[in-house]
Image (tube, rainbow, N blue to C red):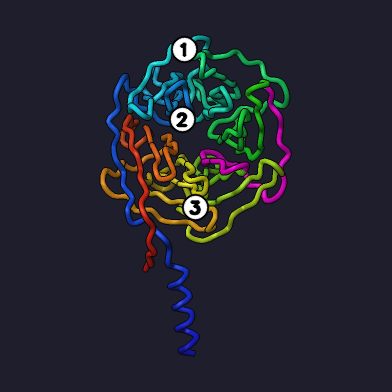
Amino acid sequence: MATSIAAILFLFCVLEEVRTYDTVQWTEVKQGGNVPLARQQFAGTRAPKGNMDCFFIFGGLNNWDSPDGLLNDLRCFDIATTTWVDLKQSGTAPSARRRHTLVAAGDFLVVFGGIDGSHAPVNSLGKYNIATDQWVSVNPSGSIPSVRGGHTAVALGTRMIVFGGQGKSSFLNDVYSYDAKNDQWSLVKSSGQLPGGRALMSAVTVGTDMYIFGGLEGYGGYKYYLDQLYKFNTVTSQWTQILIGGAPAARAHHSSVVENNNRVTIIGGYSTTLLSDVFFYDIKANEWLMVEPVSDVPLAREAFAAIPLSENNVMLFGGYDGYWPGTREEMYILTFGSTANKTVV
């Protein structure tokens, strides 16, 4: 009996040992140029523009109490010079919105969906030619998605892959593909272990696979935050749920990025409280790792945007800190160091 108890205790300790980064640091970035208004529930992506490497942001919410607090501005942060650059835009930008998505698909930035000024979900589309600084008129054909906000979108070449979100009366789990080059939508008939309908989750791509994490399901006072991780193979259109221990706490309105084409990093968000933690999923090792940052750790927040800078750096902008009016305009870089084993007691 003593031997059995000892074996059980040893197994428990092994299961509770996790690998964590021992040199992880947040650094606030001093922003130059015309810094955008503070905002939350906006969208961001990274894409080249001429000789610049841009962190693009679009739209979002600055202040609930202001009649012009809902935004539809497109801004470029030049990563090399840490300066916001004003874009000489032509054409008609998409309407002001929040909880929308923004991706760089081929030569275009594509804005889709979100919640408009009447607090209603939309399915309108905006397409911006990065080289010519022009909002291009669109008239998409094919199977157009229903209205939604809080969905996810990722880019694969010239295509945008949209998943889920919150519609007029339900949470969605459908998948659509938009061809930005040919202005055409198509419904993706997926199979396998389909996730349930959800909104405010995150999504990233690694090769031809899309990974989604977390999100929210349930209306009114019955909200359920999720800690599920799924993989969607965009070639076979098949879903697989990844079931391993050590996942981050359930959350929504967080952000995910990919470094080194192998590491899905989860930052912040909201569950029963605002979060400032960092986890990542190591795809090759099939394990979750804890991250314990030091230095200028940002306030806990949700509804921000983050992009990968290199295999060991992540950039974050904006968000909501929970204190009225709560919208933020800081920018931070998170730098990873080396790993170490840690036993959680």
Q: Tell me the quadrant of the picture where the C terminus can be found.
A: bottom left
Instruction: Give the mark nearer the N terminus: 2 vs 1.
Output: 2
Secondary structure of residue under mark 3 = strand
Identified by mark 3, the residue type is: Tyr
Which residue does the image show at 53% across and 29% down from the upper left? Answer: 103
Instruction: Give the mark nearer the N terminus: 3 vs 2.
Output: 2
Residue 270 position by quadrant: top left
Secondary structure of residue under mark 2 = strand
Report the Cα–Cα distance between label 3 and label 2.
Answer: 22 Å
- The front one of 242 and 27 is 27
Q: Is residue 136 left or right of residue 41?
A: right
Identified by mark 1, the residue type is: Gln
Report the Cα–Cα distance between label 3 and label 1.
Answer: 38 Å
Q: Is residue 220 left or right of residue 137?
A: left
Which residue does the image show at 52% across and 26% down from the upper left? Answer: 115
In the rendered structure, find residue 89 and report the number of the disc placed on it: 1
Labelled pair 3, 1 in contact (Cβ < 8 Å): no
**In this rendering, is residue 155 above or below 18?**
above
Which residue does the image show at 66% across and 16% down from the upper left? Answer: 139
**In this rendering, is residue 339 above or below 111?**
below
Is residue 207 in view from this perspective? Answer: yes
Label 2 Cα neighbours within 10 Å, binned few <14 / some 14-19 / many ≥20: many
**Residue at image mark 3:** 281
In the image, farthest residue toward the top: 90
Q: Which residues are magenta?
A: 184-208
Identified by mark 2, the residue type is: Gly
